[in-house]
Image (spheres, helix red, strand yellow):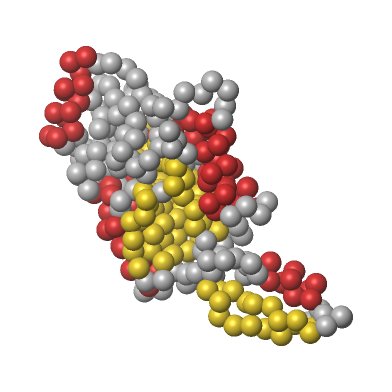
């Protein structure tokens, strides 16, 4: 094979020739017109799961699906469901903190390896909105359903209505109501939205993102999580990215889409996440002290990246059989 053709083929199949964190499996002898050279062939890391925050059970659930030969799409859906059912997590699914009127409203979206997308926005009374988003993607000609329409659709698909406001979240909301100070409260130090990306054994990438959004938000407010390119973006040729934190800031910079496009231009997932955070914090006069944004990303070779504005953002990574929580690097080092 001519070296030029070999390089073209390697790049088209997503086998990076210089991807440092990929696993070296063999060396191939490639003949160029001038001399015989040896070029390493790198195997993309798979299966792989990466998710925002300390979400070991969600990642383990997704990883098990992949290890049993399941698809990345099934993995991210089932992984996100774990956090949606976790009542202790007050920013996703059941137990999520309500809007200022006391209503828990959920947002979610999902993308598959074919570039399909489904989302639900501002849904009350349904716990597993990530699965409703998948139904929107697979069973309708649309990509987004909102509020009552999304709830009715969910019920028509067999999802059960239930009260999502737990006693613990109600208590916090009642305490907040005493002053009812309206400012975006974004949890800088703890769990927020779960965004998850997975690569399955076939090398296909999917992603999912689910949240109850900003605590005590104005009724009707929607953040980045269910918006394609904001809270999530996947391009199976390139990689995927997902966001957590103050959705308004992610949306203004179309953060997840930006990261995937930066990777398309040759940046590593880490470099791309850092540049996306830079687009937020480097705006003239931007006061980023009181809000957090964090990104995770993966490319086709299974290289990962993560970066946030402030300390305390972490992510769970399942790679080469191990599921670890890792502290993200961050911008605001004071
Ligand atoms: N990132 C979640 C939200 O802003 O709604």
**In the foreground, 277 or 218:** 277
Which picture quadrant has residue 12? bottom right
- Can residue 73 be seen in this snapshot? no
Q: Is residue 248 above or below residue 190?
A: above
* Total numbered badges shown on the rendered structure: 0
Q: Name the residue at 34% across, 42% down.
A: 312
Q: Name the residue at 44% across, 35% down.
A: 332
**In the foreground, 189 or 154:** 189
Which picture quadrant has residue 285? top right
Instruction: Provide residue 57's location: percent of width, then percent of height.
Output: 27, 58
Q: Which quadrant holds the C terminus?
A: top left
- Can residue 285 be seen in this snapshot? yes
Q: Is residue 33 above or below residue 241?
A: below
- In-image side of 211 versus 171 (left or right): right
- In-image side of 307 versus 265 (left or right): left
- In-image side of 39 versus 21 (left or right): right
Instruction: Provide residue 187's location: percent of width, then percent of height.
Output: 32, 34
Q: Residue furthest front?
A: 334
Q: Is residue 51 above or below residue 127?
A: below
Q: Name the residue at 44% across, 47% down.
A: 329
Q: Name the residue at 55% across, 40% down.
A: 276
Q: Which quadrant holds the N terminus?
A: bottom right
Instruction: Provide residue 203's location: percent of width, then percent of height.
Output: 53, 68
Q: Residue furthest right?
A: 33
């Amino acid at each position: 094979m001519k070296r030029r053709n070999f390089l073209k083929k390697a790049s088209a199949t997503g086998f990076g020739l210089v991807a440092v964190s990929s696993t070296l499996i063999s060396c191939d002898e490639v003949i160029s017109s001038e001399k015989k050279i040896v070029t390493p062939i790198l195997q993309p890391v798979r299966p792989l799961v990466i998710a925002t925050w300390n979400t070991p059970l969600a990642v383990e659930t997704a990883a098990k699906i992949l290890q049993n030969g399941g698809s990345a799409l099934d993995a991210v859906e089932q992984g996100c469901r774990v956090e949606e059912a976790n009542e202790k997590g007050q920013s996703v699914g059941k137990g999520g903190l309500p809007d200022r009127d006391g209503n828990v409203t959920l947002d979610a979206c999902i993308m598959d390896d074919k570039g399909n997308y489904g989302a639900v926005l501002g849904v009350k009374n349904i716990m597993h909105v990530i699965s409703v988003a998948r139904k929107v993607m697979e069973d309708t000609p649309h990509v987004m359903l909102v509020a009552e329409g999304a709830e009715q659709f969910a019920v028509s698909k067999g999802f059960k209505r239930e009260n999502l406001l737990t006693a613990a979240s109600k208590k916090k909301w009642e305490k907040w109501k005493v002053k009812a100070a309206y400012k975006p409260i974004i949890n800088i130090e703890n769990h927020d939205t779960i965004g998850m990306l997975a690569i399955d054994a076939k090398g296909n990438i999917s992603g999912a993102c689910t949240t109850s959004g900003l605590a005590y938000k104005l009724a009707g407010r929607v953040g980045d999580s269910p918006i394609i390119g904001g809270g999530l973006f996947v391009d199976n040729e390139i990689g995927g990215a997902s966001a957590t934190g103050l959705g308004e800031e992610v949306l203004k910079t179309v953060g997840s889409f930006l990261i995937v496009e930066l990777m398309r231009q040759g940046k590593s997932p880490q470099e791309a996440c850092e540049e996306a955070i830079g687009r937020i914090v480097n705006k003239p006069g931007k006061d980023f002290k009181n809000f957090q944004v964090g990104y995770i990303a993966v490319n086709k070779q299974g290289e990962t990246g993560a970066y946030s504005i402030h300390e305390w953002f972490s992510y769970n990574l399942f790679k080469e059989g191990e599921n670890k929580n890792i502290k993200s690097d961050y911008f605001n080092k004071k």
